[in-house]
Amino acid sequence: MSRRPRRIGTLAVAMAAAGVVGLPAAASAAPDAATGSAGAEYAFAPSYTARAWGANTAGQLGNGSTTSSLVPVPVTEVTGLDDARTIVGGNDSAYAVRGDGTVWAWGLNDAGQLGNGTQINSTVPVQVAGLTGIRAIAASTSALGVSGVGYALRNDGTVWAWGLNDAGQLGNGTQINSTVPVQVIGLTGIRAITADRGSAYALRRDGTVWAWGDNTYGQLGTGAGPTSLLPVQVTGLSSIRAVAARSGSAYALRSDGTVWAWGLNNLGQLGNGLTGTNSLFPVPVSGLTSVRSIAAGLGTGYALRSDGSVWAWGVNDAGQLGIGVAGLNSPVPVPVTGATGLIDAVSIAAGDSTAYAVRWDGAAFAWGEGSLGQLGIGLAVDSALPLPVPGVADAQAVAGGRTSGYAIVGDWF
């Protein structure tokens, strides 16, 4: 790939939404650490390369092998994945958008979730068929043994989906899997998307949220009812600016900086002070204000406030709350410690039981479960404290798959 001149000034601030992070169309300078003011802007745009670490049983690291890695390794560019701009992790699959608006996928493909017309796994990125002009992507992430789904948002505001469709999560009125993208019916004017194991969500430009697929725990936010094969409007939400979901729970960030949650709440993941009581409609997450982005893990919710602090709630069996101790769940948000250097964060993301954040200077941090290397620190251990991820300096975006981590880094020369 081409090499571009080294930047002038400070690192770009990554944009985050729904635990999926993509680069802005034009990078801007980050605040100066001492003064809080913006530094000089880039004189030149960098190239962007993808990194991955953790479990690799289906080739989800995209490096041409099925060997797991405790440290970040490059996702191969040989097949055409260069200049990656957005990256997400799925259920042992991963997806990226190139600067030209095409989508690339790698890893598990048992339900056609790579979107290339086959059901053959790939250890290197392959192009998702027929997609151009893509601005955002999402992927389902769920328990072992459950196949995945990929989603893409086009510049024209339409949504496309491919892969598993047992609960209607493709949103095309059927329950038939598809190995190539199909259009989600009835959605226009969409600005953001996110996905759960059997459900998916779309945020319209008018601030409303739409959902489809599985409704076992009320995660469609429409009250009790069966699955929905077509998008339905989530009740009571307006002025929404971001959405996130995982494992039967969903979250929405309002323009006033508050967070709302609905669905499964067996571990306190709705953050409303209750445990064991699901909610069929959105309820406010307790005590959160001035929130700028959100992310969802397996039973854990995350919020990034405008002051750069990260907050978490729900399950903490592997230390994924980041409070320095594992095993004590919290049904209300608690601050992730900044004692190890995670201050002035600009983006957050989550895997199943692992969380990730990018600091304003491009340093990436991880905490929670690390038994399969998903912390990227060179050790197969859990951590209840955020730890820097070596080899991911100048991180522009981070994402979590089921048991793997991903990042896009600036390639400066």
Image (cartoon, helix red, strand yellow):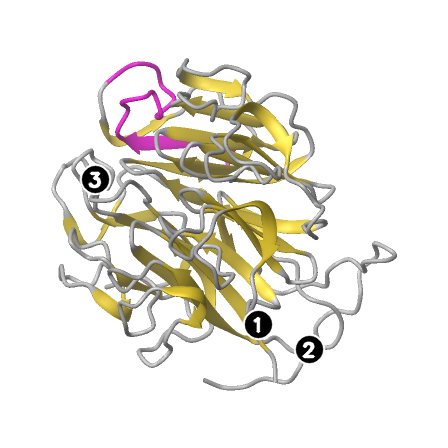
Q: Quadrant of the N terminus?
A: bottom left
Mark 2 belongs to which amino acid? Arg
Mark sitting on residue 172: 3
- Residue 185 point in image, percent of width and height: 26, 39
- Residue 344 point in image, percent of width and height: 72, 50
Using the rendered image of the protein, determine whether residue 25 is visible from the camera's viewpoint.
Answer: no
Residue shown at the point (49%, 62%) measured from the top left? 407
- Residue 47 point in image, percent of width and height: 53, 76
In the image, 48: left or right of 80? right
In the image, 149: left or right of 371? left
Residue shown at the point (30%, 56%) measured from the top left? 93
Mark 3 belongs to which amino acid? Asn
Mark sitting earlier along the chain (2/1): 2
- Residue 316 point in image, percent of width and height: 49, 33
Mark sitting on residue 7: 2
Mark 1 belongs to which amino acid? Gly
Q: Quadrant of the C terminus?
A: bottom right
Q: Is residue 222 magenta?
A: yes
Task: Sort mark 3 into few (<14), some (14-19) or many (20+) by Cα contacts within 10 Å.
Answer: many
Q: Residue furthest right?
A: 35
Residue shown at the point (32%, 21%) measured from the top left? 217
* Residue range corresponding to the magenta coloring: 206-225
Mark sitting on residue 256: none
Q: Which residue is mark 1?
A: 410
Q: Are marks 2 and 1 in contact (CB under 8 Å)?
A: yes
In this rendering, the answer to whether 125 lies above or below 301 is: below
Which of these two is toward me, 361 or 233?
A: 361
